[in-house]
Image (cartoon, rainbow, N blue to C red):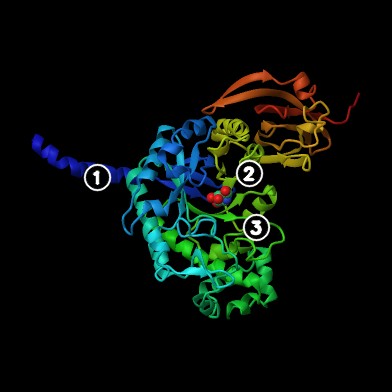
Amino acid sequence: MKQRIVCLLPALLLVLSTISAQHNPGVQIKKSGDYPQLLVNGKPFLMLGGELGNSSASDILYIKPSWGHLKEMNLNTVLVPVYWELMEPEENRFDFSLVDSVIAEARTHGMKIVLLWFGSWKNSMSCYAPLWMKTNPKRFPRTPDSTGRSQEIFSVFGKETLAADKKAFAALLRHIKATDEMKQTVVMVQVENEIGMLPTAREMSATADKIFNANVPAELLNYLKENKNRLVPEFKQKWEDAASQLNGKWNDIFGEGVATNEIFQAWYYARYANEVTLAGKAVYNLPMYVNTALPRAGKLPGQYPSAGPLPHLMDVWQAGAPALDMLSPDFYNPDTKYWCDLYTRNGNILFVPEMQFDKAAAAKAFFIIGHYKALGFSPFSIESDNSGSMPLAKTYDLLQQLTPMITNKQWLNMEGVLLDKQNKKIGLKMGKYQLVVTHDATLSWSPEAKDSVWSATGGIILQTAPDEFIVAGTGLVVTFENTDKNFVTNIAAADEVSYIRGTETKGRRMNGDQDHQGRHIRVAVVDWGIQKVKLYNSPAKIDN
Ligand code: DGJ
């Protein structure tokens, strides 16, 4: 009898694991409704992340001491590169030891992981491809520069390159599925890193010329036809300028010039990324995205890393790479609002995998999560000794406290603000109220009032009931006015609050100097805090 049970045990375990895998909802992006969400094991997850510097995860001992610091900064997710050259040092010989150790550390520290596939391209170049590929340009063709010299950039038309990338990426996903599916430490994967063409807007090889002089593929033409009313305006314009044709070569459809060269290259990058994504998802269906290097103003295609998932090429990427869940911007410029507005067109969900890690990042997190309902936020080189660490830790602390409320959508309206000296005042309409949010330094008694430069500040505001708001952040002043001018609005109560696993604890009653004797809600520029605000309304007209 005992022997029979022992014999049946492996079969029983297999059945049990199959049943539990079937009940494991995995990691998904819920796209329906006005509030997209990342669901991990069926539960909403707001990613408070940080991305490691490029080389930091290539040595287990180098990064090991940083995990405690990342936890202290209140991160719940770390974005970690996977280096193709180290993962497949010889063709078909895979070594997952680095990725395994990162997953083990993340689990020890109660964190999630986003894997960044440094595959065929990393910031335009192919520097992370294994040496057995780099040294075989016949099998894995490279692109020429503007003088015709070979560059360490793989051609997008290399069939064996794509096959090798797909195979390695699928091997990675297979390993993650086998070792992590039940724990779901890895919650998302980035496909390649900042794909982009340099120093020409498209590849100028003989192969590329031949394809460029052929007809535009039917898939792209069909997309143009079916989506003509929702194309992003700058792309639509290019097509309309060339008479909105639906048959012909690249120059016929989009006109002659570097912009068309870039569209052509973008299409083939998107197709390549789509194939890699599909190869990975076929093995383990995790959410996947590509990230983008944003161009500097005034630069033409070819002068910046071109043809990546840039805003003016969104349609090309969405048509060419439908398997991707998102196109994501990397921020190393100050124009946060400008680029986020562009990246939230065409139904694209915002996720910010890289943000310059400085003091302002802490304010931007509130804005990006509150205003754009982003899935997550992640400053770059998060393990570095940085003046942004303390502010970010405080912001992530507040966001972590508010996460159940944010992700369970316990709000009627949610907003985020970002303020500095140039953008010192923002108006928000929430329910029947008009809110005016100003930078703390607009108050003459603010510690920064006389400074020539003001800190970037920000906050998140949740309207939790018709007359109730949660104001969280740093360096802001909020006033409330009823949009019905027959009433005046005043503060019934403002309480400092904190949340532990969703349970509210009240702190100080913020009256007197703290709310300027009932005139406004304030979190000073040196503070980070959450206040629960109740309002009351009375007739504007005094009858007596
Ligand atoms: C953007 C890239 O995606 C990162 O890997 C890194 O190179 C940063 N730029 C800047 O260092």
Asked if 485 appears above or below 338 in the picture, the reply is: above
* Residue type (three-letter) at the residue carrying disc 1: Val
Residue at (79, 35) in percent of width and height: 481
Report the side of 443 relative to 159 (left or right).
right
Residue 433 circle label? none
**Among the two numbered marks 2 and 3 on one chain, the one whose residue lies closer to the N terminus:** 3
Residue indicated by mark 3: 295
What residue lies at 52% left-to-right and 59% top-to-bottom? 125
Mark 1 or mark 3, which is nearer the start of the sequence? 1
User: Type of residue at label 2?
Assistant: Ile
Quadrant into which the C terminus falls: top right
The answer to which of marks 2 and 1 sits earlier in the sequence is 1
Quickly name the residue at label 1: 15
Measured as percent of width and height from the top left, residue 265 is found at: 55, 69
Position of 533 relative to 454 (above/below)? above
| The label number, if any, that marks residue 368 in the structure image | 2
* Residue 330 percent location from the top left of the image: 59, 50
Image quadrant where residue 109 sits? top left
* Along the viewing direction, whichever of 298 and 222 lies nearer the viewer: 298
Query: Which image quadrant is residue 488 in?
Result: top right
Tag 3 secondary structure: loop
Quarter occupied by the N terminus: top left
Q: Tell me, yes or no, whether the two marked residues, 2 and 1, touch with CB atoms within 8 Å.
A: no
Q: Quadrant of residue 389?
A: top right
At label 3, the amino acid type is: Pro
Q: Is residue 412 visible in this depiction of the protein?
A: no
Instruction: Please state the horizontal and vertical placement of residue 326, each as a whole percent of the image.
Output: 54, 54
Residue 125 showing in the rendered view: yes
* Residue 411, position as x, y percentages in the image: 61, 37
